[in-house]
Image: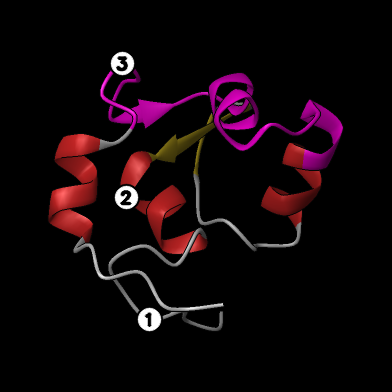
Amino acid sequence: MGKSNISQKDAYKLMLKEYPDIMTVEQMCEVLGISTKTGYRLLREKKICCLKVGRAYRIPKAHLFTYLCIGGEETSI
């Protein structure tokens, strides 16, 4: 599969405009089309970087683009 030619900055402006810059787990799962159980597993396994505020996870939209390999190289954690 080919590499995306869109920059992360352009993707940020064009994609997921209706979602906030900092998403909840439910919003992230809706975007990815996965269950919340799978979403929490991705966060626990640190496949998607997130912030934990109290007991709640918050996922910056930029981190979701990184996970999807849009506009940058995949990084290993």
Q: Could you say which disc has been placed on residue 18 in the image?
A: 3
- Residue denoted by label 1: 73
Going from N to C along the chain, the mark reached first, 3 or 2, is 3
Q: Is residue 21 magenta?
A: yes
Dot 2 falls on a residue whose secondary structure is helix
Task: Decide: few, some or many residues near mark 3? Use Cα within 10 Å; few <14, some 14-19, many ≥20.
Answer: few
Q: Does the magenta stretch include residue 23?
A: yes
Going from N to C along the chain, the mark reached first, 1 or 2, is 2
Q: Report which quarter residue 60 is drawn in.
A: top left
Q: Report which quarter residue 13 is drawn in.
A: top left
Q: Do residues under tags 1 and 2 come within 8 Å of each other at their CB atoms?
A: no
Q: Could you say which disc has been placed on residue 62 in the image?
A: 2
Residue range in magenta is 16-38
Q: Report which quarter residue 56 is drawn in.
A: top right
**Residue lying at 69% horizontally and 31% vertically, measured from the top left:** 33
Amino acid type of the residue tagged 2 in the rendering? Ala
Amino acid type of the residue tagged 1 in the rendering? Glu
